[in-house]
Amino acid sequence: MERIWLKQYPAGVPADIDVTQYASLVELLEESFVKFRDRKAFICMDKSISYRDLDEMSRALAAFLQSKGLQKGARIALMMPNVLQYPISTAAVLRAGYAVVNVNPLYTPRELEHQLKDSGAEAVIVLENFASTVQKVIASTAVKHVIVGSMGDLLGLKGVIVNLVVRRVKKMVPAFSLPNATSFNDAIAAGRGMTLDKPKLAPDDVAFLQYTGGTTGVSKGATLLHRNIVANVLQNDVWLQPALQKPPHVEQLFIVCALPLYHIFALTACFLLGMRAGGVNLLIPNPRDMAGFIKELSKYQVNSFPAVNTLYNGLLNSPGFDKLDFSKLKNSVGGGMATQRAVAEKWLKVTGCPLSEGYGLSETSPTLTCNPTDTDKFSGSIGIPVPSTWLSIRDDNGNELPPGEAGEICAKGPQIMVGYWNRPDETAKVMTADGYFRTGDIGVMTPDGYTKIVDRKKDMILVSGFNVYPNEIEEVIAGHPGVLECAVIGVPDAKSGEAVKAFIVKKNPAVTAEDIIKFCGTQLTNYKVPKQIEFRTSLPKSNVGKILRRELRDEKKTAA
């Protein structure tokens, strides 16, 4: 297929990137440690660490991990919000020759146990606030080594006060017992006296296992190699240049990292892109605290602000946001969920910076397409493929469709995963014979190469940029003794884009909506818990008895 979208590329953006620039992500990181030694790399709660600090601490932590006898390729789980320990731990795991397994710290024991078992993780680095979850499942996993961090670890004297407030005043650390755990600071101190045995890393070594839900309801690890992530960092880097070249000149790229680092979007677009560019990332541990977030933003002049639609919308509707200085803001990219026109228009009005939408998945490291960053208007599309990326719209038989016709968005490029961890059957379902990845999204491409998503092939629900899979929630609800059968769909929600709605046929007439919500809360992360419950006497089914979610969705559309 001819790449019709190349004509839309801004001047200076190449059609292809050179993926052989670095043999591994570690090579890219270590180049930046040397090149930008004295620059700030990360800021969190007013404390900053430099590229030198990041180099020294990650080297020490890597040596400490190696001293535990873990073999090259071992999987290490990271379970933290956006704190300084996150980038240090990520760099350490990679430099030691291991693979990072990113874990949502808000996971319930059930979700965490699945991910640790499936990945075969042998060690976990966790913030103490979430250590009780690890304690509940560790016995049934392969985890032998635990490192526990605290909010105040790297904050100097202030850290003592922070820990006191977090533990005693706000009571944010549930009691836990992990007798053989090492504290984060002790691990770094011990590692400083050890030598790092530098592993020989190749482009095909595994860098990350990025877990994503599956239509089967089982969370699968997208296996991302060093070369996949390196490619996407380079793709994002060249794509950002036209925005950065707009006046005023910026000495050091300043990125707002409010997206969670365990999410692929933040990992690549904030952390790693920042490293490559010699930039600084402002880490926001709790972006839901809008007042605190706005206070942090007031201290800096930010240049790049990747986020999801709900976050942009939340900020725009919070007092004080319109008083901030955005004169140096060059780039705002919406991803993870559809960016709404009303939000984009208001964002431009308040900040003076256009909001451009991008698109990608955990399986694609993540960026596949984006609107050009030198644009000043909202296109309502997911943009055009980034360099070295091919997009093809196909019918159910795998035939390419001409522009203007709706079909499944399929993509090919160096950023696409090799497959799902230990699941060749699931991998086979998403890869075509000619090497394209089937995204499961239905889109239409215009004659000039822009693509618009029109529907999702999968029944996936997108809550604030997070994938929620109906099967998983239905399985949990079905486990309630008072439920006969159930079906789950996504319904429009002003705050989160979509919310989870459950339709339930009761077995026990006494069951209430509150009972179901409370029950789900014990086994599902908050964003997966149904926000709406509707009781029915029966559910629509196919002739083979399969519950038809689509009919429930269509009913809602007609009613709306």
Image (tube, rainbow, N blue to C red):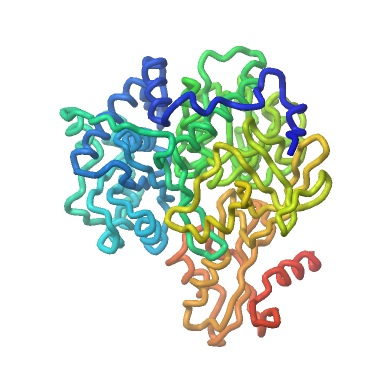
Residue 552 seen in render? yes
Q: Quadrant of residue 501?
A: bottom right
Closest to the observer: 164 or 523?
523
Residue nearest the observer in this picture, 149 or 320 = 149
The residue that appears at 55% across and 83% down in the rendered structure is: 484
Taking 487 as reference, is 68 left or right?
Answer: left
Q: Is residue 292 visible?
A: no
Residue 183, given in percent of the width and then of the height, sits at 22, 42
Percent across and percent down for residue 132 are 30, 56
Furthest-front residue in this view: 433
Q: Residue placed at 61% from the left, 59% from the top?
A: 460
The residue nearer to you, when weighing 452 against 342, is 452
Q: Quadrant of the C terminus?
A: bottom right
Residue 90 left/right relative to 350: left
Instruction: Measuring from the top left, give residue 112's x and y in whole percent.
Output: 38, 58
Residue drawn at the location 49% of the way across and 26% of the way down:
20
Q: Nearer the viewer, residue 548 or 15?
A: 15
14 relative position to 221: left or right: right
- Disc count in the image? 0
Q: Quadrant of the N terminus?
A: top right
Which image quadrant for residue 498?
A: bottom right
Q: Is residue 124 above or below residue 456?
A: above
Give above or below for 253 relative to 183.
above
Query: Residue 323's image quarter?
Result: top right
Q: Position of residue 204 (x, y in %)?
A: 43, 38
Give the residue at x 33% y 47%. Answer: 75
